[in-house]
């Protein structure tokens, strides 16, 4: 399994998957992200006030569950570190694109055969529009904007935003517009 980064909404079920799977599941991440996924470094919370407000708005039971999750975030050992530009031998070739910013070791994945970009949280989409990295959840905005530019050097037909859905309409152009708007 390849993890774009360690946020709870991306790796939350990892320990369960590793425990329940009948086969050995290989966990891959960028080296910079490993200490966070493995719990050797604490979970990065960019805007604690925003998080507290968000949690407070949840129904009581969910609020309690989320508090427990943040107090004791899921973690797991990473088997293999992947590097920028590395092509993984899955799905006809998946290129790792190191895109730090949202977290220190964030990666995007390019599914080369179908020219599909899996963004992780490098950027989001809202109401059908690509939007830049969410400032309330971005660890290093300068790096995040550089990473956005880096993505424009690739050729994509489809973009899958973890927050925002699947886009196949002029993906490259829209990505270029987003990157130049961030200047
Ligand atoms: Zn995230």
Image: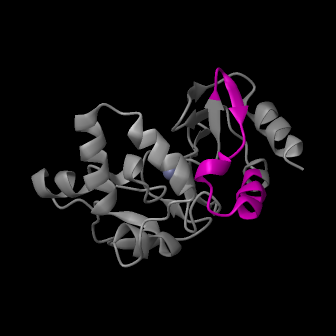
Q: Can residue 177 be seen in this view?
A: yes
Q: Quadrant of residue 150?
A: bottom right
Q: Which residue range is magenta in the image?
A: 126-148
Q: Is residue 141 shown in magenta?
A: yes
Residue at (76, 38) in percent of width and height: 175
**Residue 11 vertical position relative to residue 123 in the rendered view, above or below:** below
Which residue is depicted at the point 83% across and 40% down? 176
How far from the left and from the top, in percent, is residue 60? 26, 35
Task: Decide which of 133, 179 is in the foreground and name it.
Answer: 133
Residue at image point 54% right, 47% down: 50
**Residue at the image point whose x is 55% and y is 67% from the top:** 105
Q: Quadrant of the N terminus?
A: bottom left
Q: In this view, does 73 lie to the left or right of 139?
A: left
Q: Give coordinates of residue 63: x percent, y percent.
A: 30, 41
Q: Nearer the viewer, residue 92 or 44?
A: 44
In front of the other: 121 or 86: 121
**Would you say residue 93 is visible in this rendering?**
no
């Amino acid at each position: 399994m390849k993890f774009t980064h360690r946020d709870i909404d991306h790796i939350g079920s990892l320990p369960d998957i590793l425990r329940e799977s009948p086969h050995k599941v290989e966990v891959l991440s960028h080296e910079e992200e490993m200490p966070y996924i493995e719990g050797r470094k604490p979970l990065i919370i960019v805007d604690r006030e925003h998080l507290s407000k968000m949690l407070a708005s949840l129904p009581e039971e969910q609020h309690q569950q989320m508090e427990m999750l943040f107090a004791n975030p899921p973690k797991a050992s990473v088997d293999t570190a992947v590097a920028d530009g590395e092509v993984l031998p899955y799905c006809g070739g998946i290129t790792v694109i190191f895109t730090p910013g949202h977290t220190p070791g964030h990666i995007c994945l390019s599914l080369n055969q179908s020219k599909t970009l899996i963004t992780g949280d490098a950027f989001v989409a809202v109401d059908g529009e690509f939007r830049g990295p969410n400032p309330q959840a971005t660890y290093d905005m300068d790096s995040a904007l550089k990473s956005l530019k880096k993505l424009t050097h690739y050729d994509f037909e489809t973009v899958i935003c973890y927050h925002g859905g699947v886009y196949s309409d002029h993906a490259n152009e829209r990505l270029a517009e987003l990157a130049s708007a961030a200047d």
